[in-house]
């Protein structure tokens, strides 16, 4: 009998359905793993009703009921995703007691498929960061090396998957926050097309860039999860009305003739391109056609991001005023003090920095030079991506420059921002991109390969990713 | 461009945040580095680009119909202070 720890989601669903394991056994197993790995600080809370909910699923299976596509599977959610009756704190002191009054669409979709939501995961406060060191609850550690960061901002989510505490965790990705931690932790993370997954019930950071994404141990599980999470939602008018395909069917076990783009401007940025060149050549050897493409202004997406994301964050976080949500300064005696003192005491330094930056780029006198110009550069880059995808099916590039860095190693904000140079283009252009493990670096920590595709072409990403996952290691 | 201490203090006021003088100086240095980073976009030629504020062109909206909203209890559930079904704040006028 295959042990739970060796299963993926798709296998485990079958084992639960065939009564080899009960959902209760599986849920207890993962909660035990979470409790054994508390030192990683990946999980902020195990939901106390998880085992009860698993028992309900088991009773329904015993009754012979037809269950959903995630029957009995435990799932972890990032701490900015609302689940009714549960705390969603965004890893912020400001929202540490905030209890969700409704469930996000993604949570509802998973529950409708009979998943069991077991825990909420650590993150950078309000999803602002690339290392999960900026959490009110303290830094999360990398499951593969406790002296290193798991990446961020969905570091707790990626760490929980890498550390065997769940088979799937949801993250959110505004500038790489699903893909970069997936790369650092050696797991698979997808940022779908903007609008593919509903943002209803996700605590907003930068609404025009935020997307929810699944983090899993393998590509097929990820494809299944996206299929379940994706789709139009009348509660989020930025969701796309496009039909959701069966992403598992898109996995063809063959990449002959697939046109794989390599972006000239990205190649130039690589400090050490040995590993990447090897990967490109491997794809060529497997029958893929390698195409060099230009995305002339791709490097500008980083400055564009650090204008647009703070601008939207400054607006979105205006609602945290000490009146409506959760926390009010105990020292405030008048209304102005309530606003200023609650925000000054409740937000951490990185969140405050981005609110200030956002208000700077939006302030009169600077609005045109920064915000409006950035919006125009965004259009330029979108067109360049669109042109590139006329001559290739996917574009590949590394997820990060190198392996996970040591906790505390990067203290300068700009240096930290530069970590996101390969992931941000997908958010600015709105296109989907996935990160999956691609060998190890000098310190024996995982490296990630990123696969970009045109809008709504996630199926092609999964096809290429799955082929790579199954065959690359053997051929190395 | 370079931001001065007075600019940072103004931004703090706009942001409803307050800082010690040390933090203001710290912010000034960090901000000037960040501005150097974001000013790279000034070189881009965007003469032919139009601004799209919506990330996805919205050409269809659902019908504007009356539906059940959140209850008063739900809306107030997370309020740090509430009275008689309302958010409560200290007296604003004498």
Image (spheres, rainbow, N blue to C red):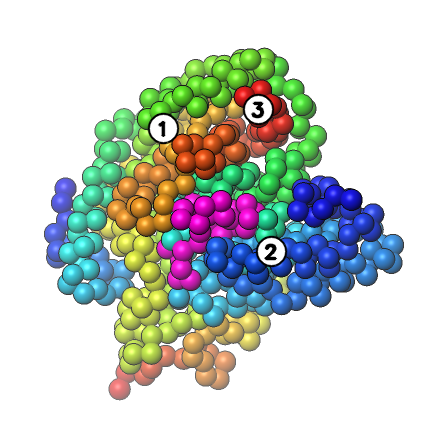
**Which residue lies most toward the bottom here?**
B94
Magenta stretch: dominant secondary structure: loop
Which sits earlier in the primary sequence, circle 1 or circle 3?
1
Measured in 3D between alpha carbons, the distance from the residue under mark 2 to the one under mark 3, in whole angstroms, is 30 Å
Have a look at marks 1 and 2 and say if they share a chain.
yes
Q: Quadrant of residue B40?
A: top left
Name the residue nearer the viewer: A219 or B19. A219
Judging from the image, what secondary structure is the residue with disc 2 in? helix
**Residue A333 part of the magenta segment:** no
Comparing labels 1 and 3, the label whose residue is closer to the camera: 3
Say the numbered circle drawn on residue A298: 1
Write the start and end of the magenta stretch as one range.
Answer: A134-163
The residue depicted at 57 percent of the width and 24 percent of the height is: A472
Q: Which residue is mark 2?
A: A33
Q: Quadrant of the N terminus of chain A?
A: top right
Q: Indicate the chain on which mark 1 is placed.
A: A
Measured in 3D between alpha carbons, the distance from the residue under mark 1 to the one under mark 2, in whole angstroms, is 41 Å
Name the residue nearer the viewer: A364 or A204. A204
The residue depicted at 47 percent of the width and 63 percent of the height is: A89
Q: Is the Cβ of the residue at disc 1 closer than 8 Å to that at disc 2? A: no
Judging from the image, what secondary structure is the residue with disc 1 in? helix
Q: Which residue is mark 3?
A: A472
Q: Where does the image place residue A185, in percent across and percent down from the top left?
A: 49, 42
Say the numbered circle drawn on residue A456: none
Neighbours of disc 1 within 10 Å: few (<14), some (14-19), many (20+)? many
B57 relative to A125 in the view: left or right: right
Q: Where does the image place residue A322, in percent across and percent down from the top left?
A: 37, 71
Which sits earlier in the primary sequence, circle 1 or circle 2?
2
Measured in 3D between alpha carbons, the distance from the residue under mark 1 to the one under mark 3, in whole angstroms, is 28 Å
Taking A412 as reference, is A433 above or below it?
Answer: above
The residue depicted at 70 percent of the width and 54 percent of the height is: A26
């Amino acid at each position: 009998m295959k042990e739970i720890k060796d299963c993926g989601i798709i296998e485990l669903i079958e084992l639960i359905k065939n009564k080899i394991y009960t959902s209760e056994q599986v849920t207890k197993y993962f909660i035990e793993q979470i409790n054994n790995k508390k030192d990683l600080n990946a999980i902020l809370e195990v939901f106390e009703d998880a085992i009860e909910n698993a028992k309900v699923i088991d009773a329904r299976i015993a009754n012979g009921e037809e269950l959903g596509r995630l029957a009995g599977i435990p799932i972890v959610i990032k701490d900015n995703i609302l689940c009714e009756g549960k705390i969603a704190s965004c890893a912020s002191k400001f929202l540490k007691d905030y209890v969700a009054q409704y469930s996000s669409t993604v949570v509802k979709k998973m529950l409708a498929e009979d998943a069991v939501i077991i825990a909420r995961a650590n993150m950078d406060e309000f999803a602002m960061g690339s290392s999960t060191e900026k959490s009110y609850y303290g830094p999360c550690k990398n499951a593969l090396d406790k002296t290193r960061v798991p990446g961020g901002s969905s570091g707790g989510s990626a760490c929980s998957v890498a550390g065997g505490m769940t088979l799937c965790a949801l993250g959110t990705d505004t500038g790489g926050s699903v893909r970069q931690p997936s790369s650092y932790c050696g797991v698979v993370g997808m940022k779908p097309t903007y609008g593919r997954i509903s943002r209803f019930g996700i605590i907003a950071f930068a609404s025009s860039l935020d997307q929810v994404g699944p983090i899993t141990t393998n590509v097929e599980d990820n494809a299944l999860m996206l299929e379940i999470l994706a789709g139009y939602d009348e509660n989020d008018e930025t969701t796309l009305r496009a039909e959701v395909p069966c992403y598992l069917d898109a996995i063809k076990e063959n990449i002959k003739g697939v046109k794989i783009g390599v972006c000239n401007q990205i190649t130039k940025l690589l400090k050490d391109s040995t590993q990447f060149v090897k990967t490109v050549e491997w794809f060529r050897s497997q029958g893929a056609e390698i195409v060099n493409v230009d995305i002339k202004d791709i490097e500008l997406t980083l400055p564009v991001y650090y204008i647009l994301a703070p601008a939207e964050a400054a607006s979105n976080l205006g609602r945290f005023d000490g009146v409506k949500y959760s926390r009010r300064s105990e020292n405030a005696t008048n209304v102005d003090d309530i606003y200023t003192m609650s925000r000054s005491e409740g937000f951490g330094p990185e969140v405050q920095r981005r609110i200030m930056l956002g208000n700077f780029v939006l302030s009169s006198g600077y609005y045109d030079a920064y915000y409006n110009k950035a919006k125009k550069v965004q259009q330029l880059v979108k067109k360049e991506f669109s042109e590139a995808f006329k001559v290739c099916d996917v574009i590949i590039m590394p997820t990060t420059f190198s392996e996970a860095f040591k906790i505390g190693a990067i203290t300068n904000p700009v240096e930290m921002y530069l970590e996101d140079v390969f992931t941000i283009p997908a958010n600015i252009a709105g296109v989907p991109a996935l990160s999956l493990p691609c060998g190890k670096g000098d310190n024996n920590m995982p490296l990630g390969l990123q696969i970009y595709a045109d809008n709504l072409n996630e199926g092609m990403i999964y096809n290429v990713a799955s082929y790579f996952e199954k065959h690359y290691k053997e051929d190395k | 461009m370079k931001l001065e201490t007075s600019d940072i203090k103004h931004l703090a006021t706009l942001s409803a945040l307050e800082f010690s003088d040390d933090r203001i100086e710290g912010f000034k240095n960090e901000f000037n580095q960040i501005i150097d980073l974001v000013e790279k976009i000034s070189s881009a030629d965007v003469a032919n680009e139009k601004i799209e504020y919506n990330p996805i062109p919205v050409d269809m909206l659902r019908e504007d119909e009356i539906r059940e909203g959140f209850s008063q209890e739900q809306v107030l559930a997370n309020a740090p202070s509430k009275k008689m079904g309302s958010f409560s704040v200290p007296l604003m006028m004498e």
